[in-house]
Structure formats: C-alpha cells, structure tokens
Image (cartoon, helix red, strand yellow):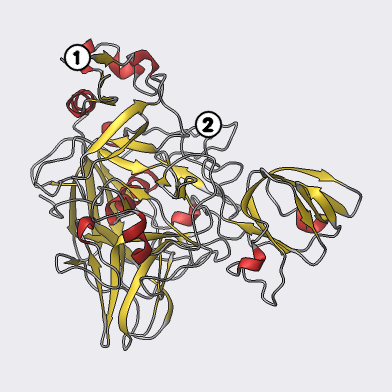
Amino acid sequence: MAKTHIADHETLERVAIALESMGASTVPIFNEEIGRYTNASIAAWLAKMRDGKNYGVSIPKGSSTACTKTGANAGIANPKPGVIGRAAVDPYVGHGAFLFFEVNGGVDADGMPYVTAIDGDGRFSRKDDTWILTPVLYTLETETDDAVNLTVSDTRQPGMSRQPAALLPNGAQRPYMLYAKYALSVDADGKPRSVSGAPVKTRSVSHDGGVSLMKTATTGDALKVAADDWYVKAMFLLKYATKNSQSIFTGCTAYDVTTAPTVAESNTTRVVIAKDKADQIIVGSAMMLGTHTGDSTDRGYSYNCDIFDGAKVIRKVAVDVSNVAIYFDVATPFNTATTYQLATAPWNTGACDMIEGDGSPTSCADSKQPFVIQGVELGLGMYEVLGNVLIQYTGSGTVVWVNPDTKNEKSGSMPDSALNAGAFPGPAGEGWNYGLYPKTFHGLMMQHGTGASTSIGICDGNYKVADTTVGWREWLSLGLLGYRGRAGLWCVSGSGGPGGTWWYFGSRRSANGRSRGEAA
C-alpha cells in the first residue's frame, strides 16, 4: 500500500483560517512513493473552500474604459496593488473564485496536472518548476447591444460552462488548473522551466519553435496557450473593472536604455557609464552587454549581447560626479571597452517575488517594471508567444485559429482540429489599431471592434498586416520594453511569421495545452 502524508494545513498560506474547522480529510494528501499529492485530495480540499458565489463584470462595448461589477462582485472595492515593502490591499483574498496557491509540479503526457509541493509544506521551492494552482472555474459570457457580461464562479450554476481548457482530451474534467508563475527559461540542458531567478529564454522562441522545444507531440507540455491568457484577463476584469490594463499595471513598456561604457576595464563584473544613463537603470532589472563590432544598435544582433545577455543589476555605485558603476550578477568576470554597448533587456524571472499580492517591485506606473496578478508574473519587457493560436491572412481577410490539443501542433500552420475564433480585429490596411471590447471564442479572449485608442476602448494596440496578405502569423501578446501604449494585457502583434524569433520574443510553459476544446 502506498505511503501517504497529510500536509500540515497550518503552514499552507492563505488557507489557515479556511481550514481551522476542517478535519484532516480535507487537507491534501502526499503520496511518498510517487512524490506527489493525490489529485483527488487536492480537488476535495479546493471543494471545501468554495463559496458558490457568482462574480460578474459588465464590459461596455463603447469607448468607455470603466466596467461595472455585478452579482457577488458588486460592492467589492478594487484592490490597491502593492510594492516590495508595502503589501497590496486586496479584498478578493479568500473569495472562492479568486483562490490561488503556489505549487511545484507539472503535467503528464495525457494532460493531467500534478503537484509535488505546496508553498508552506516544507518541500516547496521557487527554484523548482513553480505554478499557480486554482480551482476549476465556471463561466457565463453573454452579450447585449451595449455590453459583454462575464460571470465567474467556483461552483457550476445553471447556464454556466467550464472555463477554457478545463476538459482533458478524454472528456474528464481537470481536478484543478495550473498556470506558470514565471516566464519561460531553460536549464543547462535546454529543458523548459518555470522558476525564479533566471534569465528569460528569447531569441529562439516562436510558435513553430515551441513545437519542438516543448515536445508537444509526446508530452503534455506546451508554450503558453489561450486558456492561460484567459485566466489573467478574466481576473483582471473582475478585480479592477476597467478595460485599460495599463491604467493599473503599465508593465515594462518604456525601459529602452542603450549606452556605451565611459571607462575601459579588465576582469570586472561592473560597467562604468555616464551618470545620466545610470540614473535610468533600476537595480534588480536585467541588461545585455556586447562588443558591438557591427553597425547596428539593435539588440537582436549577437555582437550586442556576446558578453552577457540578461544579467541582473545588483547595485549602482558612484565613481565620480559624472560616472556610475553598474554591478552585475555574473559567474565570470569580463572586459569592457568604450566601444561596447550596454542595453536594457527583459527582466529576469522572480522580480516580483517579494511583493505581497498584486503589484510591481517599486512602481506599477513607471512603465519600467513587471507586475504580478493572482500570483502570475507578467510584463517583463518582451512579447509572450501563444503556442496554440495563429492568425491566417487569407488574401481577403483574417481568421484567428485556436488549437485545443497541442499534441496536434505543427509548424507553419494549424491542424485540421483547430477552431475558428473569428477575425483578427482591425481595418483592412496594415498598422496598429485599437479594439473597443473583449469577447471570448473557443477559450481565446481577444479584442473586438475598431476605432479606439490608447485612452478609450481596450487601450492596448493590435498590429495586423493588410487583409490582402496570404499566410500565417504568430500571436505575440503583451508588448515589449519600448512600446508604451502598444502593449498591455490585450496587446497583440500579428505581423510576424509562425517561425519568427527575435530578442524580445519569449513565452512561458503551459500545463493546459492538452484539452478537449469544449466549453461544456
């Protein structure tokens, strides 16, 4: 008989109060022989914490950014995001549909998630693959001439469907949902992971590259999928009641600093630069340094990152009135020359680890820093590729395709099993445009309508090529470190081919790639 261990409920964060009156049978049970918690015990544990309430938000289709909280959500104040040293004020903590927990775990080849540790149980470490665990949610999205109305509950109510990706390919419901806490990085062997304190993987990440990197044909692993994207957007709308995501969290969207060393040094771990440039650099952020032997300053060229790429800034020290030394967390000392190039890079993972609740390291509004919402760290200064979504340009319009089961993913196009989620929003010509409201089709919540801007409607830009184009384009979400208003939770660049890569293309792992694709 398998040995089991019942986790000490008093150490499980945010649930001590909820568990005080419950017996040992309601606590997750750890199976020592397989090194995992039993999924049945986690599901039972989550079920005991349900509140059965319907939390809603009415999202206007017009130019207004303000939404209206409805149902059990009405009257709950918007959270006040925090920073390191000042915890967020979040009235949603403890509410059933908003419960989440940090765990270690992963996903099996059939799509079934598993948990090996829960924050507070003595086994948990953010240096191991880290996920946000939530209950399976049930949703109802209705539409009128004036609004899209979204309702979410932890208990199925009449008319409700399971949330995106809740059903496994065999039709069984997941016992819980897992979302990668951190952006994609890789270990020394190139294995994808979701861990704290790592440079993000960019430069070789694309829809097509994700098929081989994540081994989607033989594993349950995938690049970020539409269901992962949906969770963050739904939680944001319900909690903050606005279509303008950057009014709450700007993310790293205006942190484009490039400079040259002012002093040449040997065998060092620092770069001396002009004070006015150093004043723009944030301790804790990441940078790249290159010998800059070519003509271009573009970070995509290897000569602009051939000394280090994504090294963390650990401190700044004044050298004299005009110069400041930037020190980096690197394993090997390096040389510098005044012809080299130093530039900001996407942040390392874990920048938000010290924040209690939603928020950013020191400012949610300076456009230089990532943010965390519902435990998920986002906005590190790079696009995040969706691994199960592509845009097809047909020569006379567009179609957005969502593939419910990433086992079927292929390079260059979509499998026959992919689902039509509608047209990519925007006018017929090429360029940036802004939708008016979000709506969900086949698990993908995307912009709809046209004619908005950075201050009305959704406020996050879409980039599309002309409808007369023929071919496939990948779905690049969130935005990069120099695009300001052309970024945000609903931002999508739809101009690059499915195999396109660059220094600001990243993603994250997904445990939800294998699904039946039905909102049943």
Can residue 500 be seen here? The reply is yes
Local crowd at mark 1 within 10 Å, few (<14), some, or many (≥20)?
Answer: few
Describe residue 236's horizontal placement relative to residue 291 as left or right: left
Tell which circle, 1 or 2, labels the residue nearer the N-terminal end.
1
Q: Is residue 24 left or right of residue 457?
A: left
Q: Residue placed farthest to the front in the image? A: 189
Report which residue position mark 1 lands on: 25
- The image position of residue 249, as x and y in percent, is 50, 50
Q: Which amino acid, by three-letter code, is at mark 2?
A: Ala
Q: Nearer the viewer, residue 257 or 329?
A: 329
Question: Which disc is residue 87 wearing?
Answer: 2
- The quarter of the displayed image where residue 392 is located: bottom left
Q: Residues within 10 Å of mark 2 (few under 14, many from 20)?
A: some
**Residue drawn where x is 19% and y is 57% of the image:** 404
Give the x, y percent position of residue 462.
40, 71
| x then y, percent, for residue 243 | 38, 57
Q: Position of residue 217 (x, y in %)?
A: 23, 56
Residue 315 falls in which quadrant of the image? top right
The residue tagged with tag 2: helix, strand or loop?
Answer: loop
Q: Secondary structure at mark 1?
A: helix
